[in-house]
Amino acid sequence: MNTLGRGTTLLVDTYDVAEAVRTAVEVAGTDLGAVRIDSGDLLLVAHRVRQQLDELGATGTKIVVTSDLDEYAIASLAAAPVDAYGVGTQLVTGSGHPTSSMVYKLVARAESTDRKAPLVPVAKKSTGGKTSVGGRKWAARRLDAYGVAEAEVIGTGPVPAGLADRQLLVELVKGGEVVAREPLDAVRDRHAAARAGLPMSATQLSRGEPVLPTEYVHGASGS
């Protein structure tokens, strides 16, 4: 609060929404600017949060809703006590659970400040289908018999032999040190090659459904 001021917006759905709202009002006071909801049943949670804020005396605190919103999701929230929406966050490249969204989360931490210290897996324990698996991940794109992409595969542990040459990540920095440099032309060529290997449905206009399913493999080994 000393840095951002009481008019800031605080995210309250990281674990226990009700407890987070209570803490937010205790810390910022009843003139807290806004609280942000980013997951769960947004319609139900928004009503509950509005009631709780009013009961705590924070009647002027606004509610901001995000979570991959598009025009359809916003229309479904018309009856909710929502003051603002975070729009334009829907970017999904895989279907099923989990999806390969453009979101970065902590997956491991070092046991000490030594750069060579072993890493300890870190996982998210929150409820609501948002739990995660700890450990550094690899990502690869599996091709069908015709050389066309058919799935994005994410896993921990050894990379299966059949996917070793189909990995999507290119290591450029490790431990804070630059380990490789690429000219812009190389990046462009890789992008063009990857795009050319997508199925034809990837070039069709759609609401935004994923073209490739995302498969998760834990502790993969072998082929």
Image (spheres, rainbow, N blue to C red):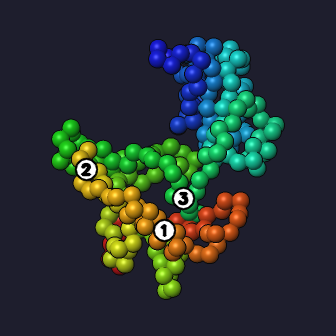
Amino acid carrying label 3: it is Thr
Residue 65 position by quadrant: top right
Residue 58: percent from left, percent from top: 67, 17
Q: Is residue 6 above or below residue 128?
A: above
Residue 165 lies, with reference to residue 26, above or below; the image says: below
Residue contact between numbered discs 1 and 2, judged by CB atoms under 8 Å:
no
Closer to the camera: disc 1 or disc 2? 1
Residue type at mark 2: give it. Val
Residue found at x 47% / y 14%: 2
Q: Nearer the viewer, residue 210 or 178?
A: 178
Q: Secondary structure at mark 3?
A: loop
Badge 1 or badge 2: first in the primary sequence: 2
Label 3 and label 1: CA atoms lie apart by: 23 Å
**Tag shown at residue 49:** none
Crowdedness near tag 2: few (<14), some (14–19) or many (≥20) residues, C-alpha within 10 Å: few
**Which residue is drawn at the image coordinates 58% and 47% (left, top)?**
128
> Mark 2 or mark 3, which is nearer to you?
2
Is 193 situated left or right of 63 in this image? Answer: left
Q: In what quadrant of the picture does the C terminus appear?
A: bottom left
Q: Seen in the image, is 200 located left or right of residue 144?
A: right
In the rendered image, the vertical position of residue 7 relative to residue 116, given as above or below:
above
Dot 1 corresponds to which residue?
A: 192
Residue tagged 3: 99
Which tag, 2 or 3, sits closer to the chain's start?
A: 3
Give the amino acid at mark 1: Ala
Asked if disc 2 and disc 3 are in contact, CB closer than 8 Å, the reply is: no
Q: Which residue is mark 2?
A: 178
